[in-house]
Amino acid sequence: MVQMDCALFPGLLAEALCARSHDKIERVYFCNSGAEAVESAIKFARAFTRRRRIVYCAHGYHGLTLGALSLNGAAAFRDGFGPLLADVTEVPFGDLTALEDELRRGDVAAFIAEPIQGKGVYEAPATYWLGAERACRETGALLVIDEVQTGVGRTGTFWCHDQFGIEPDLICASKALSGGYVPVAAVLARDDVFRAVYSSMDRALVHSTTFKQNQLAMVAGLATLSVLDDEGLIEHTRAMGDYWKERFAPLVERYEMLVDVRGKGHMIGLEFGAPTSRRLRRWWRVTERVRPAFFAQTVVLPLFHRHRILTQVAADNVNVIKLLPALTVGEPEIDLVVEAFDDVLRDAHRPGGLLLETTSAMARGSMRRGQRRRRSPAATAAT
C-alpha cells in the first residue's frame, strides 16, 4: 500500500511552487482545501518541534474543520462545536510584545497568521512580521503563514509575505491555486520539517488524504501559474492596488463615514465609522441599533440592486466591505466600482440614509420567499 510512484504533474507543480518561494522551501504536500492545509501545518509543526501549543491571532480565520476552527479568531464560529484543541493561545494581531511573551514560554510548536487578515482586511507593518520571525527563530517555534486568501498573486506578489521580507517555515495555499475551478491546496515546507513527518518507510502514509495531488487538480494548478506568468497578472495586480487607493481617495475626503481604504493588490477593505456631524450621527446610531455593523450591509445591498456589483461585508459585526475581484480586473472596472460606491455613499449621507431602502428590500425579499413557499407543491404536500 506504500505509494512508491512520483507522478509527473504533482512533481512539476511542486517544483513550480518551490521556485516561487524562498530558498528554504523545498517540499510540498498537496491536499484539497485551505482548512486541510492548515490542519496539515498543525500536525507538521507538532511532529517537528515535539511541542503541542499553537499561537494564533485575534480576528484570524483559518478554516472550519476541528483543528483550524480551534485557531479561529471569532467565537461565533466555535460555539456549539467544542471541545476543540486545548493547546492553543490567541494573541492580538500586530502586537509583537504579546506574541513574544507567549513564545518565550518555550512550549509553542508554531505561530500561525495571515499576512493580511481576511476577516476585516486588517494589516500589520513589516516591522511586526520581521519581529515575529525573529522571535520564532529564537524560541524554536515554527512560523506558519496562511496564504490561502492572500497568496498566488492576490496582493501584488506571488506570496504576500514576500512584501515583508520574511521566510516562513510553512506556507499554506489554496483557493486561487486552481483559478477557483478545482479543489486543490498545498503546504510548502522546509525539508527537515517535512522529513519529521515522513521519517521512514513505515510512516509514508502517516498523513495523507484520498484525493491529494490528483491529476486534474495538478493540471489546473500548473495552468493557473502559466496564466499568471503569460498574462503578467501579478504585476498588473500590484499596479491595480495603487489604482484602487488612488480612485477611492476622493471618496474618503468627501464622505465622513468612509474612514479608511486599505489592503494590497486586488484585496481591498473599505472601513466605515461613526460620522462627526450631528445630523449624520443620529442616523448612524439608528442604523447600528438594528444590528451591530449594519451600516456596511446597507451599502452592500444597493450596490447589488442598483449597480449589479456583488461585494461582501468582511466579517460579522465589522463595518468593513471587502473587495476581491478577479485578478484580470483593470482600470475601467475599478472606475465602474468607485462610481457605484460614490452613488450609494451619496445617498447614505443624506437624511434617512440607506436604512429605509435596505430594510424595505429585505422585507420585500422575505415576503416573496413566503409567497413562493405557500405556492410550492412541496409546501402544499407538507401541509
Image (cartoon, helix red, strand yellow):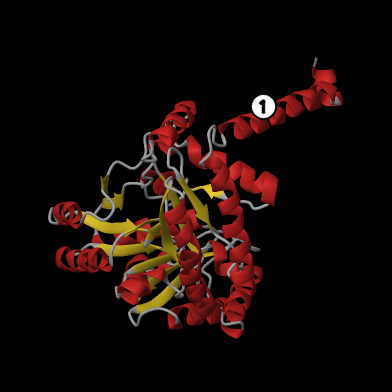
- Nearer the observer, 18 or 145: 145
Where residue 126 appears, x then y in whole percent? 27, 68
Q: Residues within 10 Å of mark 1 (few under 14, many from 20)?
A: few
Where residue 350 appears, x then y in whole percent? 53, 38
Q: Quadrant of residue 122?
A: bottom left
Dot 1 falls on a residue whose secondary structure is helix
| Residue found 50% across the figure and 80% down from its top | 235
Compared with 79, 380 (above or below) is above
**Which residue matches tag 1?**
363
Compared with 203, 106 (above or below) is above
Quarter containing the C terminus: top right
Horizontal side, residue 350 vs residue 204: left or right: right
Where residue 43 appears, x then y in whole percent? 36, 57
Where residue 57 appears, x then y in whole percent? 31, 50
Compared with 102, 368 (above or below) is above
Q: Quadrant of residue 197?
A: bottom left
- Nearer the observer, 295 or 174: 295
Compared with 219, 140 (above or below) is above
- Nearer the observer, 116 or 184: 116
